[in-house]
Amino acid sequence: MSVQTYVSTGDESPLAPLRDLALGLMTKDGPWRGAFVQQISPRSHDVIFDIGCGDGALALMLAAAAPRATIVGIDPDLSAIERAQTRAAAEGRSITFLQGFAHEAAHFVRRAAPTKVVLSLVLHKMAPIDKRNTLHAARAALSVGGALHLADYGPQRSVLMQRLFRTIETLEGYENTE
């Protein structure tokens, strides 16, 4: 039995939007998310689970790309889920947001298993055992022939990138970003 190691990044803080803005600027949020949505290639018949959806930014982009697709965002942070719901309502998007841990993805499957499971900037926040459990849960949740899409930080190969990544670790916490 695994013990969940989720630790809030302080999203309930009034400074959370500033942290999110800083991370978005440092990671060039718009360009990579746009490319990621293209890679995911959402279609109207898709059921897409966005595991670790945070404030719903990617889920909203997926819904905009395929308005008839079923998008389900899952995140353990209730304040992030509330922000995601508010954003979706403001944009008139029909997206379901559920509070839960990534390793519980298979438990959220009701009538139809997802055709696509998406994890973006989630795995770097987890201990190795939780990474493994999350990937197993994502695979178990997928429908036959479904696809898993991952986007996260990779090794920082230059001294400059290592130093810049230290800033991200400072903002998100050092716990599991090593």
Image (cartoon, rainbow, N blue to C red):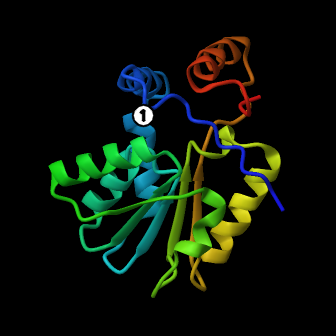
Above or below, comparing residue 42 to residue 89 in the picture: below
Residue at the spot 58% in from the left edge and 22% down from the top edge: 168
Residue at the spot 32% in from the left edge and 52% down from the top edge: 61
Task: Estimate the x, y position of residue 32 in percent, counting from the top left.
Answer: 45, 40
Above or below, comparing residue 103 to residue 111 in the picture: above
Q: Amino acid at mark 1?
A: Asp
Task: Estimate the x, y position of residue 21 in percent, counting from the top left.
Answer: 38, 24
Residue at the spot 37% in from the left edge and 66% down from the top edge: 71
The residue where tag 1 is placed is 29
Relative horizontal placement of residue 65, taking residue 40 as reference (left or right): left
66 vs 82, nearest the viewer: 82
Task: Estimate the x, y position of residue 144 in percent, counting from the top left.
Answer: 60, 86
Q: Is residue 42 visible?
A: no
Q: Give the quadrant of the C terminus.
A: top right
Task: Estimate the x, y position of residue 16 in percent, counting from the top left.
Answer: 41, 25
Q: Quadrant of residue 146?
A: bottom right
Label 1 packing within 10 angstroms: few (<14), some (14-19), many (20+): some
172 vs 152, nearest the viewer: 172
Q: Is residue 62 visible?
A: yes
Residue at the spot 47% in from the left edge and 25% down from the top edge: 23
66 vs 133, nearest the viewer: 133
